[in-house]
Image (cartoon, rainbow, N blue to C red):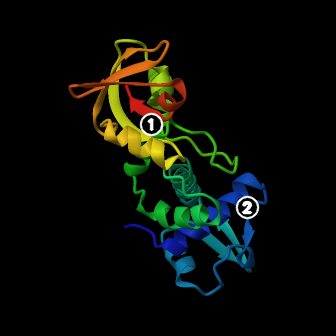
Amino acid sequence: MKLSDKAEEILEALWIAVEEEGKGFAEIDQLGIPAGDPAYQELASRTLIEVKEGRVYFRPEGREEGRRTIRRHRLAERLLMDVLNVRGEAGDDKACQFEHLLNEGVDAKVCTMLNHPTTCPHGKHIPPGDCCEEARRSGDLGVVPLTELKSGEEGEIAYIQTEDSKKMQKLMAMGVLPGNRIVLSQTFPSYIFRVGFSEFAIDSAMAREIFVRK
């Protein structure tokens, strides 16, 4: 059964205190959820945490659940800020909401789309998942900019990463949309690619903003 949002927030804060700050435990008043909140009992009943004299400790099962929870949160930050360009305080708030939707399996797909990032936008470590280990073993680059393809290679468009709305509109008008196949036919002096039955030419700066899955 899925944990409540507050329970996941406790696990995140506890992970930071224990695994990243090396405290071994966290005081309840430092976790952002007041003492007596049902979320503590929810976690304790699943043997994920132990509460003693105002301090919260991980149980072995809770440590792994905390790891998965902080991973989802930081992947949500990368997705919102890097791909959807939702930044600043709004990005942080939306990431807190969005992470709860990244159930097991979905987070791996997001991680692969983002090319298995190792840090969040704030520079904090993202615990690796099974998909990251598999990508390293297989040498799979995941999602890469169009500029990483060679002439004759093709892939599936994953997303466009640009803050320029006019560029976005121009690329979309060319058929550069997530899910469409793209074939790169030339890389110099300009990038020439084909989407469907149409061929287009763009410069390297714009080509770097098209991300494809090989």
- Estimate the x, y position of residue 206 in percent, counting from the top left: 50, 32
Q: How many marks?
A: 2
- Pick the front one: 172 or 70: 172
Within 10 Å of the Cα at label 2, are there few (<14), some (14-19), or many (20+) other Cα atoms? some
Q: Mark 2 or mark 1: which is in front?
A: 1
Quadrant, the N terminus: bottom left
Give the vertical position of 44 relative to 80 (above or below).
Answer: below
- Estimate the x, y position of residue 160 in percent, counting from the top left: 44, 41
Give the vertical position of 2 relative to 106 (above or below).
Answer: below
Ranked by sequence position, the earlier of labels 2 and 1 is: 2
Q: Residue at x 34, y 12 (%)?
A: 152
Q: Residue at x 60, y 63 (%)?
A: 92
Q: Residue at x 40, y 40 (%)?
A: 170
Judged left or right of residue 17, residue 74 is left
* Residue on which the image places disc 2: 17
Q: Are marks 2 and 1 in contact (CB under 8 Å)?
A: no
- Estimate the x, y position of residue 142 in percent, counting from the top left: 44, 30
Within 10 Å of the Cα at label 1, are there few (<14), some (14-19), or many (20+) other Cα atoms? some
Quadrant, the C terminus: top left
Judged left or right of residue 34, residue 211 is left
> Circle 1 — which element?
helix
Task: Report the Cα–Cα distance between label 2 and label 1.
Answer: 26 Å
Label number found at residue 41: none
> Circle 2 — which element?
helix
Which amino acid, mark 2?
A: Ala
State whether residue 177 appears in this view.
Answer: no
Q: Residue at x 49, y 40 (%)?
A: 114
* Residue on which the image places disc 1: 131
- Estimate the x, y position of residue 196 in percent, counting from the top left: 22, 28
Which amino acid, mark 1?
A: Cys
- Pick the front one: 122 or 181: 181
